[in-house]
Each structure stands twice: as C-alpha cells, then as structure tokens.
C-alpha cells in the first residue's frame, strides 16, 4: 500500500488532485490512479512489489512527481507530493 498527502507550496492540502503510479520494467507495465480527498490524502492499494514513479496534478498547480518509490510486500509506504505555483 502506498499512501500520502498532496499539498501546495504553503502546506495546504489539495483536494481532488489526480495521483498516478506507474511501474514499467522488462516483464510488466502497471498503472494505478486515484484522487486525493478533502484533506489531501490518497491511498493506492494493490501495487505490486517493485519500483514505482508517482505524479500528482491539480487544476491551478504545476505537476509534481517522485521517482523510484520502492514498494515491498507486506509494508506500507507514506509520501508527500508538493504542487507549486500555477500551471499557467
């Protein structure tokens, strides 16, 4: 399970942000998508063990990402994605 929070540069939670996890290797390619809640929190369940790249986007903000987030069987991981400024 991979969970976390999407926040703005001032630390405010961003609700409704789209969070995408991508895993691509020689044997498989996987993708999981969710949206953050009112408190900016999100949870991605059922991710296979391996290395995942995360991205988050929301209207009015520039996208942000994290590369190479290791998911291990039986362990939870917590991350924070910070969206800055305007995407304009």
Image (cartoon, rainbow, N blue to C red):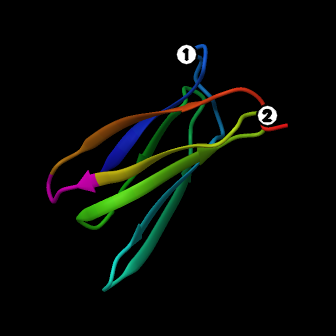
Residue at x 54%, y 50% (from the top left corner): 55
Residue at x 48%, y 63% (from the top left corner): 32
In the image, residue 66 sits, relative to residue 80, either above or below, namely below
Coordinates of residue 6 in the picture (x, y in percent): 53, 33
Which numbered dot is residue 60? 2
In the image, residue 22 sits, relative to residue 54, either above or below, namely below
The answer to which of marks 2 and 1 sits earlier in the sequence is 1
Coordinates of residue 72 in the picture (x, y in percent): 18, 56
In the image, residue 42 sits, relative to residue 6, either above or below, namely below
Which numbered dot is residue 64? none
Residue at x 70%, y 40% (from the top left corner): 58
Mark 2 burial class by Cα count in 10 Å: few <14, some 14-19, many 20+: few
Taken as a whole, is the magenta stretch helix, strand or loop?
loop
Q: Is residue 84 magenta?
A: no
Residue sticking out furthest to the bottom: 27
User: How many numbered marks does the figure carry?
Assistant: 2
Residue at x 60%, y 29% (from the top left corner): 38
* Magenta residues (range): 70-74
33 displayed left or right of 23: right
Q: Quadrant of the C terminus?
A: top right
Q: Which residue is mark 1?
A: 11
70 displayed left or right of 55: left
39 displayed left or right of 24: right
Q: Secondary structure at mark 2?
A: loop
Instruction: Return the residue nearer the eye: 17 or 29.
Output: 29
Coordinates of residue 2 in the picture (x, y in percent): 34, 48
Is the residue under label 1 in contact with that under label 2 (CB below 8 Å)?
no
Instruction: Return the residue nearer the eye: 85 or 19.
Output: 85
């Amino acid at each position: 399970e991979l969970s976390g929070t999407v926040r703005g540069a001032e630390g405010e939670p961003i609700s409704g942000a789209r969070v995408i996890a991508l895993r691509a290797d020689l044997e498989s390619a996987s993708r999981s998508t969710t949206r953050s809640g009112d408190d900016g929190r999100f949870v991605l369940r059922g991710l296979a063990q391996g290395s995942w790249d995360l991205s988050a986007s929301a209207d009015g903000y520039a996208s942000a990402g994290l590369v190479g987030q290791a998911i291990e069987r039986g362990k939870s991981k917590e991350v924070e994605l910070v969206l800055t400024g305007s995407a304009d």
